[in-house]
Image: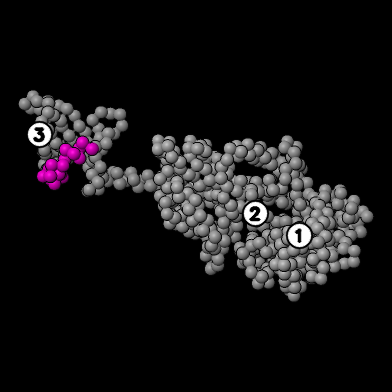
Amino acid sequence: MDNVGTCIYVKDSETGKCLFANKLLKRTFELELKNGTLDMLLANARPLGAKDGFYEVDHKERGRWYDLYQVLINWIDGRKVNLYALYDITDKKIYQKKIEQQAYTDFLTGLYNRMCCERDLAVQIDRAKGLKQQGGLLYMDLDDFKHINDGLGHQYGDVLLQSISHAFQRVEGIGETCYRMGGDEFIIIIPPESFSQIEIIIEDIKEIFSKPWYLKDADYYCTMSMGVCTFPHDGDTVADLIKKADIVMYEAKRAGKNRIARYSSDLNSLSNKRLDMEKNMRDATSDNCSEFNVYFQPIIDIQKPGAPCAGAEALVRWNSSALGFIPPADFIPLAEYLGLITPIGNYVLREACYACKKWNDNGHPEYKVSVNLSVVQLLQSDITEVVGRALRDTGIRPENLTLEVTESLAINDMKRMKVILGEIRKLGVRIALDDFGTGYSSLNHIREIPLDVIKVDQSFVKDLAEDEYSQSFIKMVAELASAIDVSICVEGIETREQYKVLEGMKVRLVQGYYFDKPLPREEFEIKYVME
């Protein structure tokens, strides 16, 4: 036993007296033998599996691990003794930890991954139940991350994910409970001991996304939508809790993105509704988008006598055969989330072009049609070909088609947008900047984008009759637009008082319920084409 490669230790089972220690044990545990702490170390060994006699010793002071085998035997003089055999497994443990780290860590960001999240969440749910306390789960998805990824390249998307991950780890109370679930989705577990700080943690996370990220020599904004659940109150299993947090996060996106939503029991029915909507939307898009209808809201030229119609904005509506009429605010965010907005948007583009060509050929050659382009559509590599094909197939004059791009999208990737919009404009198509005044832009930005129309956001129209700031803003933008030879369109005019305020300003185009609501194509043509 003195010459085996294992530490051997024998002691009397009744008196505890050491009867034998081989050379390797004396050399390895010299200090413990001298201090009398070896027995305590062995007593604290952790059982391994269901087999009796097998243990693991974690010697924290040395940073070493040992396999321990303990057995009761008869010694040479016949007395009962405990024999201990210890084998150093430190290298094995270090290798295991390395493998575990690779298995539980996201390679790109260094955060823990989905597998680790599910394991840790199960532990925290059990702890919360045992302590009769609450924990929290924050489920986050980056808003329009595809825009950054496709616009700048995947390497800059990766840089953004790494920067966000590092920022999460600096938030007090969650440094060790941040997880990347895949893609641009993250989960943060708030353990019971930190739950009292959950509102502070949420505010700290919101603060992270309130500032731009420096990518490719420029600042870019990227916001997030968050769903918040508590455990075990909202759910007491891993699958149930993550599912509910995902549902709540989607509700935050549906409500306009860059928002925080919290779970309530009412969302159970909403989740079922969402699943039904998703299934039926997939069926509808695979059937040539036949259930989607294009409505047209007239755009009025108030600079001409009698304020005639100058064309229309095309707006998509979904009349599902299974679910009935679905409001745009419900299905458009879901279509974007599912990646189905591209076939729907392309369908609307073609239908709008066909309609406008008919109007032009039936006595209204000046009519123009405006079509909204989503973020996903605009970042498709073949968007210029899609627009060009729509022009050729329908025969519409390019100058009678206006494509609307939201301000936040255009400003957030100025360099790429200038290239894409420039290529589209070479086709002869007009470009409109939609929702102007709501993003992070300065007025100077509109000089950099190839534009034909600026559409002022409806938020400046709501109190237009009384609010001097709104009046001054529209007047200023109209003056600026006139100076750079760009038209201005004011959306959301609903009352005569709002309309009268625009008199005397250099505003040419107006739309809103004061003039007319969005109409099915047949009704629009009866009122504005066949008169």
Query: Residues at badges 3 and 2 in contact (C-beta under 8 Å)?
Result: no
Q: Which residues are magenta?
A: 28-44
Q: Please state, as top left, top right, bottom left or bottom right, where the N terminus lies in the image.
A: top left
| Residue 305 left/right relative to 65 | right
Q: CA distance from mark 3 to mark 2?
A: 77 Å
| Residue 506 left/right relative to 31 | right
Residue found at x 13% / y 42%: 36
Q: CA distance from mark 3 to mark 1?
A: 92 Å
Farthest top residue? Answer: 78
| Residue 520 left/right relative to 320 | right
Q: Which residue is mark 1?
A: 491
Residue found at x 76% / y 60%: 491
Q: Which residue is mark 2?
A: 376
- Give the mark nearer the N terminus: 1 vs 2: 2
Q: Nearer the viewer, residue 67 or 443?
A: 443
Give residue 150's position: percent from left, percent from top: 59, 57
- Give the mark nearer the N terminus: 3 vs 1: 3
Give residue 46's position: percent from left, percent from top: 27, 36
Q: Which residue is mark 3?
A: 17
Amino acid type, residue under disc 2 in the picture: Val
Q: Residues within 10 Å of mark 3 (few under 14, many from 20)?
A: few
Amino acid type, residue under disc 3 in the picture: Lys
Q: Please state, as top left, top right, bottom left or bottom right, where the C terminus lies in the image.
A: bottom right
Please identify, in this view, whether the residue under mark 3 or under mark 1 is nearer the observer: 1
Q: Residues within 10 Å of mark 2 (few under 14, many from 20)?
A: some
Residue found at x 60% / y 48%: 252
Q: Nearer the viewer, residue 519 or 338?
A: 519
